[in-house]
Image (tube, helix red, strand yellow):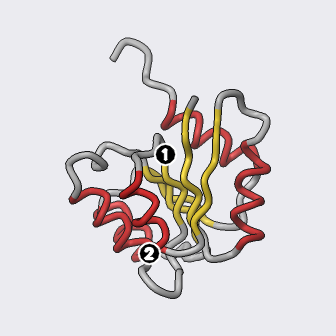
Amino acid sequence: MADILVVDDSKVMREMLIACLRGQDELSFTQANSGLEAIEQLSLRPYDLLLLDLNMPDIGGIEVVQFVRSQDRLKSIPIIVVTTRGDDSSRDQALQAGATRFLTKPFSPETIQSEVSGVLTPVAGS
């Protein structure tokens, strides 16, 4: 079972992401409504994947990525940034901070399913 932490200050967006992934087997979800709450959740236990918004009122997504990558026990967690900020600068900043993938809102259910499957499924032969 893969445990996914879904972090977005919009409850509707968190629920939309979870709804898109509910059909996939063996996934469980925890929600956080801010960067600070995400860091608190990550301090309690590691997750198999982080779905993370960039724009949050307290600690932004880039800072959460930097925190995760700075922690030995967390640094290998894949992070998919899902944000409205589709500009190249935001994308570059997120990826340079250590995000695994970068998606812009709005997204199709197929896109989020494919991205999540891609980071949770080890590449054959590796």
Residue shown at the point (51%, 27%) measured from the top left: 121
Q: Image height check: is 41 above or below 93?
A: above
| Residue at (23% x, 55% y) in the render | 71
Q: Which mark is residue 73?
A: none
Residue 106 picture location, percent across and down:
72, 66
In this image, 93 relative to 6: left or right? left
Q: Residue at (57%, 59%) from the top-left corner?
A: 103
Instruction: State the mark number for residue 49.
Output: 1
Quadrant in the picture for residue 110: top right
The quadrant of the image that shows the N terminus is: top right
Q: Secondary structure at mark 1?
A: strand
Q: Residue furthest top?
A: 125
Dot 2 or dot 1, earlier in sequence: 2
Residue 56: give x, y in percent of width and height. Answer: 53, 81
Give the side of residue 66 with respect to residue 9, left or right.
left
Q: Name the spot of residue 116 as percent of width and height, x first.
A: 58, 41
**Residue 89 or 17: which is nearer the viewer?**
17
100 vs 35: above or below: above
Residue named by callout 2: 36
Which residue sits at x=49%, y=45%? 49
Q: Point out residue 30 in the picture as x, y percentages from the top left corner.
A: 60, 53
Hey, what amino acid is under mark 1? Answer: Leu
Provide the secondary structure element on which disc 2 rests: helix
Q: How many marks?
A: 2
Q: Residue furthest bottom?
A: 57
